[in-house]
Amino acid sequence: MRVSYATAIEMNLKKGKINADNYTAYILIGEKCMYNCSFCSKAQESDSKADLLSRVKWPKITLEEFVNNFNANKFKRICIQVVSSSDYWAELDYVLNFLKDKNIKVSVSIRPKNIEEVRFLFKKYLVDTVGIALDAANEKLFREIKGGSFKYLEDFLIAISKEFPGKIATHIIVGLGESDEDIVDTLLKMNKYGIIVSLFAFTPIKGTKLESYSSPSLERYRKIQYVHYIIEHFNVTKDIFSFDSNGNIMKFPQFEINNEEAMKTSGCSWCTRPFYNEKPGKKLYNVPIPRL
């Protein structure tokens, strides 16, 4: 297993300085993925360094080191990122059983084999949230970048969200080639079914198929964050947004937006993902402060 470098520092497994408060412990289970997402350092055909996920380094530790050094009182949540390796379940089972009697919220981000696997996570291990990433915001991009069917996964998310309302999350990556309109459509549908959306800015990683792509402009990312905030906080429909012929948002509806809140990291409660998409000292896509 691996932990994010900031989490390793919090657990006294590494030395270093953290430039943001770290309320969530981030751990990574699994190594080389059986899938081949074009942006991911863990993809089947990726040549990226083994300790990378996005731009964050994830030092390798043993299960014994995790159990002996993890203090649930230091965190508000633990987020388990599961790589779809052939042997991930045994390690995931071990960690979730260890956490089961700890007083801490547990999120699991996974590409589940079927709906029964999601039910198992909630009912056996009593996890708080299950994240199932869409990543790409339209069918064509999803097929090209992730492989498989966008509609199938979208329908899967909706079905399981009805069974576990308010407990299902997904990821949307801004900057893969989608239009603003694609993201608005996806955000509206996720919001309709109470699915939590975590926004990410695309981060090019050396060794991946998309290593030559550019990150989205901060201006565009802010625009999407404001849209996300509006959809989360107000009962809106698509017709309140104005788009040009390329699907770019041309005009915002007139709502009172809390700019500071909109710019914060979105996702499960207490999730801040410090510097997951940006380098310390550089522009911040997601401000690593917990949302209100």
Image: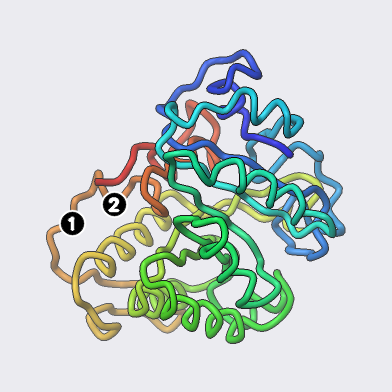
Q: Which residue is drawn at 57% across and 39% down?
A: 26
Residue named by callout 1: 257
**Left or right relative to 127: residue 240:** left
Residue named by callout 2: 262
What residue type is disc 2 on? Ala
- In the image, residue 158 above or below residue 100: below
Marked residue nearer the N-terminal end (2 or 1): 1
Binning the other alpha carbons within 10 Å of mark 1 as few (below 14), some (14 to 19) or many (20 upward) gives few
Q: Which residue is drawn at 58% across and 57% down?
A: 109
Residue 177 makes an appearance in the image: no
- Marks 2 and 1: CB-CB under 8 Å? yes
Residue 5 makes an appearance in the image: yes
- Rounded to the nearest whole Å, what is the CA distance between mark 2 and mark 1? 8 Å
Quadrant where the image shows the N terminus: top right
Corner quadrant of residue 88:
bottom right
> Helix, strand, or loop for circle 1?
loop
